[in-house]
Image (cartoon, rainbow, N blue to C red):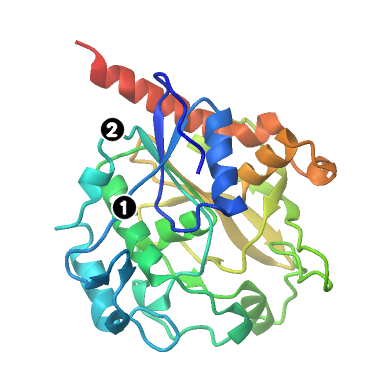
């Protein structure tokens, strides 16, 4: 993991994850750094009501699929961050970024569901789910500035009680529609790496934080890699602010908490465009410009800087 930058830059915490050597983690780290923030990996947030084996949930918490057992999921939803180390994990932190990654275990949904049953898409990390949900709930309740990307977007939705689409292709097929691989490319041929998909996103609310950041009706050529999504924000405190429509089905691409100063969720991956542009990769031209892609991170860093200044004022 890269050593945090010295100096007085706003400190941007990256929600804990064990796989810090992956591109997914490093892309977020570098995007925060390029935006003027000081990225640091946060400690794992643990529930006081679940047993652990070191940094991992004890085996008794999980079923044979790696899904959190219902009784433990209910404890997480009931007690959230009470008795946890969430407050201590955020000491000295000015804002938080929640990153992409694994599917969320369906027992943690407001209305628990059986898993989608697609063996090739079975990719759960219940330990990280618990850590992310406790931290997300704490940030939302205490108005800590946050940017939630892809899985982070879904964690934000689940934390607010929103239903989650467990598999977008299956969701489309059930409606007799075709998702056209807009949200995630199909697997690459053997010997090749699957690339990020790329598509446009329609901004739907000119009064939103998203519009204030981007000043555009269309977010063009955003990198995308997800097979899950948030089905609806109805009945939650979230407001959808951007969407994508494919074959007559509209999916949410961004939402926010209007009653918080900076709580923004993005289903797509601006950090990928930032780093591919920085690295001058040949494929970078497929995606949005570095100025467009880094704007989300710069806005978060600017908000963190304002909050730091306000707290240090006499």
Secondary structure of the residue carrying tag 1 is helix
- Indicate the quadrant where residue 275 lies: top right
Q: Give the residue furthest to the top.
A: 314
Label disc, if present, on residue 54 of the rendered structure: none
In the depicted structure, whether residue 36 falls above or below residue 40: above
Label drawn at residue 92: 2
Quarter location, residue 245:
bottom right
Q: Does residue 236 appear left or right of residue 154 in this picture?
A: left
**Crowd rating for badge 2 (residues with CA inside 10 Å; few <14, some 14–19, many 20+):** few
Which residue corresponds to mark 1? 135
Q: Left or right of 227: which side holds 288?
A: right
Work out whether residue 289 can be spotted: no
Q: Residue 58 at what x, y percent from top left?
A: 29, 76
Q: Position of residue 35 (x, y in %)?
A: 55, 28
User: From where the camera sits, is residue 189 visible?
Assistant: yes
Q: In the rendered structure, are the residues bearing label 2 and label 1 in contact, judged by CB atoms less than 8 Å apart?
A: no
Which mark sits nearer the N-terminus, 2 or 1? 2
Which is more toward the observer, 75 or 171? 75
Left or right? Give the position of 301 relative to 121. left
Image quadrant occupied by the C terminus: top left
User: 184 left or right of 147?
Assistant: right
Q: Which x, y percent locates residue 71?
A: 24, 82
């Amino acid at each position: 993991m890269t050593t945090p930058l010295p100096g007085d830059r706003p400190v941007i915490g990256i929600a804990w994850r064990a796989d810090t050597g992956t591109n997914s983690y490093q892309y977020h780290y570098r995007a925060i750094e390029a935006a003027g923030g000081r990225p640091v990996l946060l400690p794992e947030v643990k529930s006081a009501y679940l047993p652990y084996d070191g940094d991992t949930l004890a085996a008794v918490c999980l079923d044979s699929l790696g899904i959190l057992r219902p009784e433990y999921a209910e404890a997480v939803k009931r007690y959230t961050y009470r008795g946890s180390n969430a407050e201590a994990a955020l000491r000295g932190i000015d804002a938080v970024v929640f990153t992409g990654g694994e599917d969320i275990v369906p027992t943690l949904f407001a209305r628990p569901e059986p898993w989608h049953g697609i063996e090739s898409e079975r990719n759960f990390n219940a330990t990280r789910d618990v850590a992310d949900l406790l931290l997300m709930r704490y940030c939302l309740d205490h108005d800590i500035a946050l940017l939630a990307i892809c899985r982070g977007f879904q964690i934000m939705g689940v934390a607010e009680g929103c239903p989650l689409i467990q598999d977008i292709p299956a969701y489309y097929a059930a409606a007799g529609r075709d998702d056209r691989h807009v949200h995630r490319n199909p697997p690459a041929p053997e010997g090749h790496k699957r690339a990020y998909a790329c598509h446009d996103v329609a901004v739907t609310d000119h009064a939103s934080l998203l519009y204030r950041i981007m000043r555009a009706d269309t977010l063009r050529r955003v990198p995308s890699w997800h097979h899950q999504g948030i089905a609806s924000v109805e009945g939650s405190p979230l407001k959808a602010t951007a969407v994508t429509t494919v074959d007559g089905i509209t999916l949410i691409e961004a939402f926010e908490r209007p009653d918080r100063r900076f709580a923004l969720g993005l289903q797509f991956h601006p950090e990928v465009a930032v780093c591919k542009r920085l690295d001058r990769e040949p494929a970078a031209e497929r995606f949005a410009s570095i100025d467009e892609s880094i704007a989300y991170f710069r806005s978060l860093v600017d908000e963190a800087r304002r909050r730091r200044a306000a707290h240090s004022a006499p």
